[in-house]
């Protein structure tokens, strides 16, 4: 059975791998995340990794009306 991996799982994997290898995983800016329309759909375990990934442009999402960002956290990566 092929279930794939969600976008929030993918960024959490990247975040945890970066931390394990000693990279700085601190979040210094939530500007992009704060504009995310579907942030309430991101599961608790993936919020910090998603902020980190957006800060570093690992994930960017799609614009909606030029104002908000949709990251589709449950979508397939």
Image: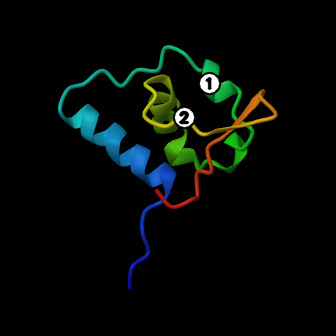
Q: Disc 1 designates what residue?
A: 32
* Residue depicted at 58% across the width and 58% down the height: 74
* Residue depicted at 49% across the width and 14% down the height: 28
Q: CA distance from mark 1 to mark 2?
A: 8 Å
Specify how the rendered protein is coloured: rainbow
Res 13 label: none
Q: Nearer the viewer, residue 2 or 45?
A: 2
Q: Residue 56 appears at what percent x and percent y?
A: 43, 24
How would you rate the neighbour count of disc 2 (Cα within 10 Å): few for under 14, some for 14-19, many for 20 or more? some
Residue lying farthest to the top in this orientation: 28
Tell whether label 2 touches label 1 (CB within 8 Å).
Answer: yes
Q: Residue 19 appears at what percent x and percent y?
A: 27, 32
Residue 18 placement, left or right of 4? left
Where 32 sits versus 43, above or below?
above
Residue 36 placement, left or right of 65? left
Q: Mark 2: which secondary structure?
A: loop
Q: Which sits earlier in the primary sequence, circle 1 or circle 2? A: 1
* Residue depicted at 21% across the width and 36% down the height: 20
Q: Disc 2 designates what residue?
A: 60
Where 3 sits versus 16, above or below?
below
Q: Nearer the viewer, residue 69 or 13?
A: 69
């Amino acid at each position: 059975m092929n279930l794939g991996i969600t976008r929030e799982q993918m960024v959490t994997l990247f975040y945890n791998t970066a931390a394990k290898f000693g990279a700085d995983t601190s979040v210094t800016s939530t500007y992009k995340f704060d504009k995310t329309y579907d942030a309430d759909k991101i599961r608790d375990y993936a919020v910090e990794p998603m902020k980190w990934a957006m800060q570093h442009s690992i994930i960017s999402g799609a614009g909606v009306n030029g104002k908000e960002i949709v990251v589709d956290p449950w979508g397939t990566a």
